[in-house]
Image (tube, rainbow, N blue to C red):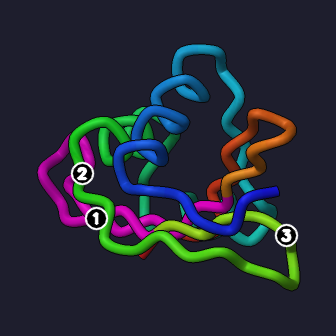
Amino acid sequence: MTKVLSRKAARQFLERCLNTGELTATKHCLGRMKRRGFDFDDVANVIRRGEILTVAYDSQHQNFKLAVAGEDLDGIELTLELGLEIEESLTIVITGF
C-alpha cells in the first residue's frame, strides 16, 4: 500500500464512499454523535463541504487518518477524524468534536 495520499485523492475516495454507502462509525464515535447531537447526515455534510486539514499514514492501523473540518446541517462547527481503508473502499468515522 502506498503511504502517500494527496488531499485531492482523499476527497475523491471520500466521495466514492459516500456515494456507495461505504461509511461506518466506531462505537466511540456513535457515543460522541449521541452526546453532541450530530448524525450521519451531518457527517456527510462535513465530508462533502468541509476542508481536509490533515492526511497522514497511520502505520499502526495501516490506513490513512484524516481530519476534516466544516459545519453540520445546523451550522455548528464539526471536526471529524476519519480512517480511510483504501483496500476495502471504506471510510471509518473515528470521532467528531
Assess whether residue 84 is covered by the magenta stretch: no
In the image: residue 70, left or right of residue 65: left
The amino acid sitting under disc 1 is Ala
Q: Residue furthest bottom?
A: 60
Dot 3 or dot 1: first in sequence order is 3
Q: Going from the N terminus, do you reach mark 2 or mark 1 first?
A: 2
Q: Position of residue 21 (x, y in %)?
A: 66, 21
> Which quadrant of the structure image shows residue 97?
bottom left
Q: CA distance from mark 3 to mark 1?
A: 23 Å
Q: Are marks 3 and 2 in contact (CB under 8 Å)?
A: no
Q: Main secondary structure of the magenta part?
A: strand
Q: Which residue position is annotated with label 2?
A: 50
Res. 69 mark: 1
Q: Alpha-carbon neighbours of circle 1 within 10 Å: few (<14), some, or many (≥20)?
A: many
Along the horizontal axis of the image, is 25 left or right of 71?
right
**Is label 2 in contact with label 1 (beta carbons under 8 Å)?**
yes
Q: Picture quarter containing residue 94?
A: bottom right
Q: Residues within 10 Å of mark 2 (few under 14, many from 20)?
A: many
Q: Amino acid at mark 2?
A: Gly
Left or right: 20 in relation to 96: right
- Between residues 64 and 39, which one lies in front from this camera angle? 64
Q: Which class describes the residues within 10 Å of circle 3: few (<14), some (14-19), or many (20+)?
A: some
Q: Nearer the viewer, residue 32 or 48?
A: 48
Give me the disc on residue 62.
Answer: 3
Q: Position of residue 92 (x, y in %)?
A: 70, 52
Q: Is residue 82 magenta?
A: yes
The span from disc 3 to disc 2 (Cα, nearest Å) is: 25 Å
The residue stretch that appears in magenta: 67-83
- Could you tell me which secondary element the residue under label 1 belongs to? strand
Q: CA distance from mark 2 to mark 1?
A: 5 Å
